[in-house]
Image (cartoon, helix red, strand yellow):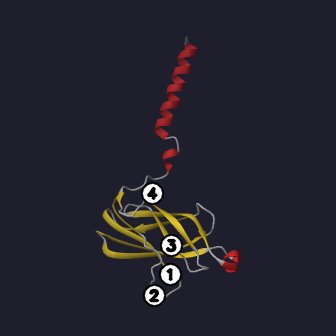
Amino acid sequence: MPKRLVVVLATIAAVLTGLITGSGEGAAAPELQRISINGDRFATVGNHSFCNGELRVSLTAAPRKPGFVRVGLTSYGFSGQGPSWKRNPVCKLLIGAVHTSAIGYAQWSFFNADFGPKRGQKVVRDIRTGSGVVELQLSSYARNNPIRLRQSLGLSYYMLVP
């Protein structure tokens, strides 16, 4: 009888410990709820050997940073043409993010992103948008060019940022 009681108590303790500490699956922040009329993927071209590919956008709240959005771009693989692509298969992009929120109107942030032919390559950046309702637009632009030439249609979102 005491052995059975010990086993039951040990099982209950293990279950409660798992519930309190978590299983580790929820370690990644959940995607922010958002409204988009053009989805989460966009095609783009780069400035090297006619490179082109497709990116998936994920938006999460940056951990321990209220008012920041973590933008993740995941590549579906980029391709190019000619011997220069075979020598250096890297598509270099300039990603432009513009947001309108309580902290400002049409605030721009730019960051570089390099992708190769391998699927699943990821670039992550935190953008300060402020908390509340935010409109965020993402697109790619010509890199190393004094004129901002858009190279993709991009995406647009309305969301609530914690």
Q: Give how far apart the Cα atoms at labels 4 and 1 are.
A: 31 Å
Q: Mark 4 points at which residue?
A: 63
Q: Which amino acid does label 3 sit on?
A: Thr
- Pointer 2 local density, CA inside 10 Å: few below 14, some 14–19, many at least 20: few
- Residue 19, x across and y down, in percent: 47, 36
Q: Mark 3 points at which residue?
A: 44
The mark that comes first in sequence, 3 or 1, is 3
The mark that comes first in sequence, 4 or 3, is 3
Taking the spot 52% from the left edge, 41% from the top edge, the residue there is 23
Give yes or no for contact between labels 3 and 2 (Cβ–Cβ under 8 Å). Answer: no
Q: Which amino acid does label 1 sit on?
A: Ala
Q: What element carries label 4?
A: loop
Taking the spot 57% from the left edge, 76% from the top edge, the residue there is 92
- Residue 133, x across and y down, in percent: 30, 63
Give the quadrant of the C terminus. Answer: bottom left
Give yes or no for contact between labels 2 and 4 (Cβ–Cβ under 8 Å). Answer: no
Nearest to viewer (mark 3 / mark 2) = 3
The answer to which image quadrant residue 38 occupies is bottom left
Q: Give how far apart the Cα atoms at labels 4 and 3 are.
A: 29 Å
The answer to which image quadrant residue 89 occupies is bottom right
Q: Where is 143 relative to 100, above or below? A: below
Give yes or no for contact between labels 4 and 3 (Cβ–Cβ under 8 Å). Answer: no
In this rendering, does residue 61 appear at all? no
Q: Name the residue under label 2.
A: 147
The mark that comes first in sequence, 2 or 4, is 4
The mark that comes first in sequence, 4 or 1, is 4
Q: Is mark 3 on a helix, strand or loop?
A: strand
Residue located farthest toward the front when viewing the structure as drawn: 81
Give yes or no for contact between labels 4 and 1 (Cβ–Cβ under 8 Å). Answer: no
